Amino acid sequence: MANIMLSHMNHWKTIPYKKIDNFREYYYEDRSNNVYFQDWDRILRYHKALGYDGIELAPWDMHEMMALFGTPENFRDFAADHGLKISGMFHGVEGAHIASNYDAIIESGKAAVDLIERFGGETMGTCPGSDYASAPGPLSEEGVRNVGKVLDEIGRYAVDHGVRLGIHNEFFCSINKENHRHLLEITDPRYTFYYLDTAQISIIGEDLLKFYEDYHERMCGFHLKDTADPKLPDYIRYSPHVEIQEDGHRWFWEPGEGVLDFPGLWALMKKYGFKGWVSVEDDGTPDLLASMALSSYYVMNKLKPIYW
Amino acid sequence: MKHGLSMEIVDTHNQQPNRNRRESKYYWDEIYTLVSAGGFTEVETPYDPQWAFGGRSGVPLVYANVLEKDGSAQNYLKRLNGYGIERIVGVHYMPGMFFSGTSPHSNGAVSLDAYFGAMEYFGRGAVDYVADLSGSYVTMSATPKIGEIEKAYGENYESGAEDVLKGTAAAVERLASYARSKGVRFCLKNEFYGLLRGDKIIDFVKALNEKVYLDIDTAEYKISGCCPVRVIREHPDLIGVVHYSDTSFVDDQECYRQMNPEFPAVKASKVYRDLGDGTIHFPKVEAALKDIGFTGHVIVSARDSYDVSRSILRARYYINSKLPE
């Protein structure tokens, strides 16, 4: 039994078909490759063909997915027919630093946990709140503690339902370089874990390997992606709407296409015996299928020999 | 007759290769040069509130994003002028997201108060935007999708649909009144999957206490089983804007009741085609418009193109060869 299961974070946004049965006829309508990327059936086949064990779902896709599948269980079974599991679903606690938002955020968080449980998922990588510019940052001590309180409460509910909530840093979030370690320290390690996005944490300014070394006991999963912009200056990270750049500059690349030391990380994962889901996140790519293949090749050929 | 182009040519909703580019400003800047090179100097843009959320301000399809990037509508227009685009003549406003709910964990419950409240809030923003651009019209998708309403109300669909129409009438009257005060024409688009599909829109707008115009979107009327040429000839005083959208789709699978009706579930098909690739006879549409003396805007719509450059040039070729002055 492998220690690591490989998933892929779903950035195939709004897939409009469940299964296209008249594929050849449909292709000839416009003779375009678009039809190769419009149904869940084929996209899940691509996952399996490229060596992924699972798929991580995105909450912003739920409305359209449920229109196609009806229930999470139906999608879970459909994925299982393709040899895939649901590793988990991403989540966010926007506005958690404001105490008066507590009830609504807890309700939304528990609903997300329920949904993940019905999908058969295990992880809930969770963005810990609003972006830096809109919160605005830096958060007060009270603001950080409000975030921690929300995470622990949802996290406790998640553990009770077989799901692990992990803090997922974003480089532009109000939980940032000056307070994200503090947030980890004040949250309950029984309920709040860490979901390591390798690129985000590096762009924030952390040393990826040192951060893993320091908090390896809290790790519950990964977003595996590379970057060419580690240690990005504060004035850029804290500016509004920074994630999508006007000129198309990409913060994120496929593992191996940036500058991060993934073999070093894998050696640490071996040292500490990580067990769980690693989810490749090909965020910002113009060609998801090519990126999935590139990422899988790197993982299978460069990282798997180190530890799996 | 002068033909503008709808920027709904860019699919901002569904998966397709290179989809990520549409979230960056550079992509839209370049698209406008392609539109201009294709011989279109007037455009209509979608007005889609979904882009007001999530930090995607590079997508210039809601006023807040234009202000974020350019400071004012006039500055934005000046930039487009530099690409050869003379005017944004109007917008297509889509409030449907407020009916289906923005919560990813929505169980289908819907609040009509929230829907109409958000519709009016962003609708006034759309009117302000068009007025500040010295544009001519706002055309609004008239109702949520029938499939969404069926999901929301289940066995109470009939009474739910009645409530939606009643609330829509009141909200449209207020928005049209506001638009009139700003010198903007308010129109309704009746998609083939909305409650006012086909002919149903006619009596609806006639019953309103405020002048509201029809958006004759040819593909939407055709799929609904309603001849757009007949509507143009029978109701010349109601025509506010015309969209030349092509289709060869025949809805023999009750696709109009799907939650995602633009993607027929039983048998996949590209519902909206590039100009000339469908079965609509546009010379007849154009003749009808000339006969009634229509002086409003005619907008070519290759909605959700698979290849924007190709669709622009296909449209230009069709206009040049089939719709000469």
Image (spheres, rainbow, N blue to C red):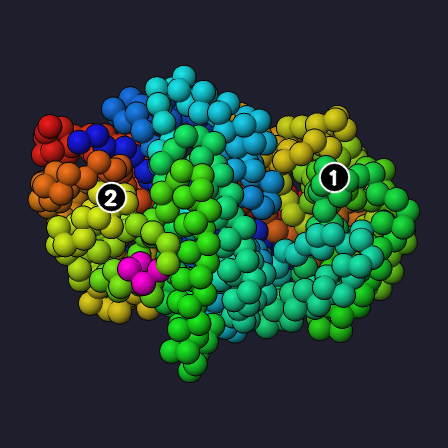
Question: In the rendered view, does B293 fall on the left or right side of B105?
Answer: left
The CA span between labels 1 and 2 is 44 Å
Q: Which residue is at the far top? A: B82
Residue kind at label 1, given as amino acid type: Tyr
Residue at the spot of label 2? B242
Using a 10 Å C-alpha cutoff, classify the residue at mark 2 as few (fewer than 14 neighbours), some (14 to 19) or many (20 or more): many
Quarter holding the N terminus of chain B is: top left
Q: Residue at x 44, y 30 (%)?
A: B133
Q: Position of residue B117 (x, y in %)?
A: 55, 58
Q: Label 2 amino acid?
A: Val
Mark 1 vs mark 2: give the one in front. 2
Chain under callout 2: B
Q: Are marks 1 and 2 in contact (CB under 8 Å)?
A: no
Image location (x, y in percent) of residue A37: 38, 50
Task: Identify whether B20 is placed above or below A25.
Answer: above
What chain is tagged by disc 1? A
Residue A80 included in the magenta stretch of the image = no
The residue where tag 1 is placed is: A132
Vertically, is A281 above or below A16?
above
Predominant SS of the magenta segment:
helix
Mark 1 neighbour density, 10 Å: few (under 14) some (14–19) many (20 or more): many
Residue segment shown in magenta = B204-208
Q: Residue visible at 37% across and 58% down?
A: B209
Which residue is drawn at the image coordinates 46% and 46% (left, top)? B178
Q: Quadrant of residue A158?
A: bottom right
- Quarter of the figure with residue A276: bottom right
Q: Is residue B202 left or right of residue A253?
A: left
- Name the image quarter holding residue B2: top left
| Residue appearing at x 73%, y 33% in the figure | A238
- In x, y percent, where is residue A200? 69, 39
